[in-house]
Image (spheres, helix red, strand yellow):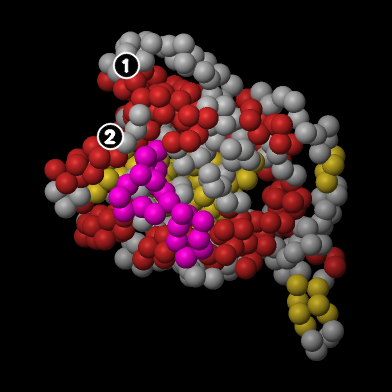
Amino acid sequence: MSQRSKKLKLGVYLDNHGGHVASWKHHSVIPSHAMKLTYWRSLAESAERGLLDFMFLADANRVLYIRNPKAMSQVAATPFFEPLTLLSALAGFTKNLGLVATMSTTYSQPYHVARLFSSLDHLTEGRASWNVVTSSSSEEAPNFQRDDHMKHDDRYARAKEFLSIVCGLWDSWEDTAFLFDKSTGTYLDAKKMHYLNYQSERFSVRGPLNQPRSPQGWPVIFQAGSSDVGREFGAEKADALFTAQDDIGRSRAFCADVKSRAARYNRTEDDIVIFVGTGAVVGQTMAEAEDKFAALQANVSADVALHLLSEVLAVDISNMDPDKLVTELPASDGMQSRRELLLAKALDGKMTLLDLSRFVAAGRGHRTIIGTAKTIADDFQEWYETQAADGFLLAPAYLPGSLNDFVDLVVPELQRRGIYRTEYEGKTLRENLGLKRPAHPSEAD
């Protein structure tokens, strides 16, 4: 297998109780703890103990499963802490761990977003990252004085413009603008301040941002879309991509496609780090791991699993026969790439709709690895060394148990193989991910 220039990268997706939909029912999980800062602190400290690159918080401006009270009553649909608030609280308990927060471009304003993430980057000395999303659910629209949800391509067009404005605001000040020179009485060089003066049909933003340029230049830009328009957006703008892939060949093709597109925007393959979402159930033996997974699956009722599949597809499937082999899935304006992945999974595995829904229940549509430290490390190493992934966004099945199992068992095995770090490479998230700090436009030739 080929040598990679960067070590394998790992982040952790922290849902309230775990990546499995029935995680809250696990005997070791105390659901009410998800409302306590001490719980989240313990998760962040475990992730940093495992030398993970970052913790990743999703977000939604809605209550999940609100149209199906039965499903909502059985699934951990809330709480949903506002991620920047939570990450700011956790920053003081960690030193190296990157802090990735999700915020929607569909239901936010650029100046507000630029200021929030710049603030977090300063206060953490360069560990902030923005996961740029466009909001796939129409349930968010009524919470923002809108009757209708934007169409898929319109959301991405807005997101592209939105991100350009945010990056422009992050460049409001040159890196050397703030002098703090007491001998001359010069606090800052006003000539190194830049107005944005952005005008379009969608936005009017004058600027400048009321903060110095942040430690990373720009906080790391994360993006999760895998549709064609999402790939193009990621190739042009993202530092890191998060994708759902269940087949190593298709994942390798996805990575090659995205990275080949980067050249159109004067970027290189090394300018983008691609993470594959992966659930993990670890056991000392294969039998133990399989028993852990079976116990979780046994706590998922058919109606909840089917409703979760409807949520992921953003379309009602209640009129479909759950025991019939899947030959097609209904289209929607939601996560188009996720629909394609699930359809391929069902066709390859000759799965019924109920089979597919149980797969989704295990990892919200991402692949789930069940095994020992050795077998999981074997899998990760193959995906990494054959360029099917630069790293993995872990979704531990239940928390904190599955995260601690991974840190204590799998991380040492990856280190033994020489493909994973034994200490953090730098101080900022960009440095640890092996990403360049963006130059200020004033430095351009």
Residue 332, percent across and down?
A: 55, 19
- Residue at 38% across / 33% down in the picture? 361
| Dot placed on the residue nearer the N-terminal end, 1 or 2 | 2
Quadrant for the C terminus, please: bottom right
Q: Amino acid at mark 1?
A: Thr
Visible residue check, residue 180: yes
Q: Which residues are magenta?
A: 17-39
In depth, the one of 297 and 415 nearer the eye is 297
For numbered disc 1, what is the local secondary structure?
Answer: loop
Report the disc number at residue 352: 1
Distance between the alpha carbons at the discs numbered 1 and 2: 18 Å
Residue 171, percent across and down?
A: 72, 56
Q: Is residue 422 magenta?
A: no
For numbered disc 2, what is the local secondary structure?
Answer: loop
Q: Is residue 30 magenta?
A: yes
Residue 328, percent across and down?
A: 41, 11
From the image, tell me which residue sits under label 2: 298
